[in-house]
Amino acid sequence: MLKASCPQSALHEVLQVVSRGVSGRSTHPVQNNIYLCSADGNLRLVATDLEYVSLDARLPALVLEDGAVTVPGRVFNEIVGSLPDEEVSLESPEPGQLSIRCGKSNYRVRGLPPDDFQFLPEIIPQAEFALPEGALHTILTQTVFACSDDETRPILTGALFVVRPDLLTVVATDTYRLTLRTLATEISVAQERKVIVSARVLQELLRILREDSEDAVEVRVSDRLIEFELRNIKLASRLIEGEFPNYEKVIPADPDKRLMVRVEPLHRALRRALIVARQDSNRVVLHAREGVLQISAVSPDVGSVEEEVDMELTGEPIDIAFNARYLMDVLEAVESEQVVLGLSGALNPGTVRPAGREDYLYVVMPMQIMT
């Protein structure tokens, strides 16, 4: 019979993370619950959809009796969040029931027997490495947004991790744009491995990562699973099976036109142009002339807009149309004061790179210029 206590603030903090692993759509009711048990003098909380998200966290606690129980994640989280900032007593007087006491509040929550709860398999790593928390946050921020949400093409709903002994490459694409980010790091792996990691688990990881932290995140990869461990949390997922598209084929050769432009003015101009462009599939036309980048959009129902941004042009003038939202996405992620737009023709993909850096590349397909 589980019997333990811990501070309300610490329990609520862990629950806010773990409860996001509850899918709420499982055909097995117990998988819609959070598994709560004692473990080596700690409380262990687990939630998983048995596919692409498993969140497993440990919390220091005073454990008086060992045991386990499962309780509905939303209810458990809501109750603990409403309690005063005092010690919370947790007790499972009988299988499938949890008593929660704090201050003058006393709840009895119906759950399900813990023996029916299933976990993802234990990972047997074939590649292992550690990354600074802030660096991993940057890598995922700059790539995951380009993953597709089209469930009919599951391989595009994740990011490709290419793991080499001295280099990590992360690639994501929805076929309209592609992001590629590299990081030189030491990786314990015998040979190159390529795995596709679900965007869903990477988005959950992004919520947990602290962008200014240098703490290590341990990453373990096997044939079917990937696991991230940081602080008191393990986040695991099944890998997406299938062959990721040959992304190297869609990366344009060196463009013959380059536009050096400051990120903030360009982002503001695109945001203003989007007011009109959203009525025309977010289409904006870039008119690159010496010293000036003109941005225009037209909508029969709204009207038109023209913007100008200072820039440096290398090569001949060019007119090309893009989805404004796709350009804004990369500008919000690039973490650079200036970017270089590489162009080679109105019907050819364009590239965006942070000025002076080669570790990040964004490829975006053009749109037709409407006349």
Image: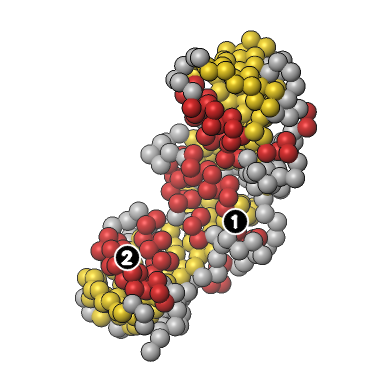
Q: Find numbered disc 1 in the image and state the secondary structure of the residue it sits on.
A: strand
Q: Which percent across, then down, holds residue 71?
A: 66, 29
Q: Find numbered disc 2 in the image and state the secondary structure of the residue it sits on.
A: helix
Residue, disc 2: 271
Q: Which percent across, then down, holds residue 263?
A: 29, 61
Tag 1: residue type? Gly
* Mark earlier in primary sequence (2, 1): 1
Assess disc 2: are there few (<14), some (14-19) or many (≥20) residues with their C-alpha within 10 Å of its C-alpha: some
Q: Residue furthest right?
A: 116
Question: Label 1 near label 2: C-beta < 8 Å?
Answer: no
Relative to 149, does residue 18 appear above or below in the rendering? above
Relative to 212, does residue 203 appear above or below in the rendering? below
Q: Residue furthest bottom?
A: 371
Q: Residue at x 30, y 79 (%)?
A: 304
C-alpha span from label 2 to label 1: 28 Å
Residue 158: image tag:
1
Answer left or right for 356 relative to 89: left
Q: Which percent across, then down, holds residue 332?
A: 37, 57
Q: Residue furthest top?
A: 64
Instruction: Check the picture and name the quadrant holding the N terminus.
Output: top right
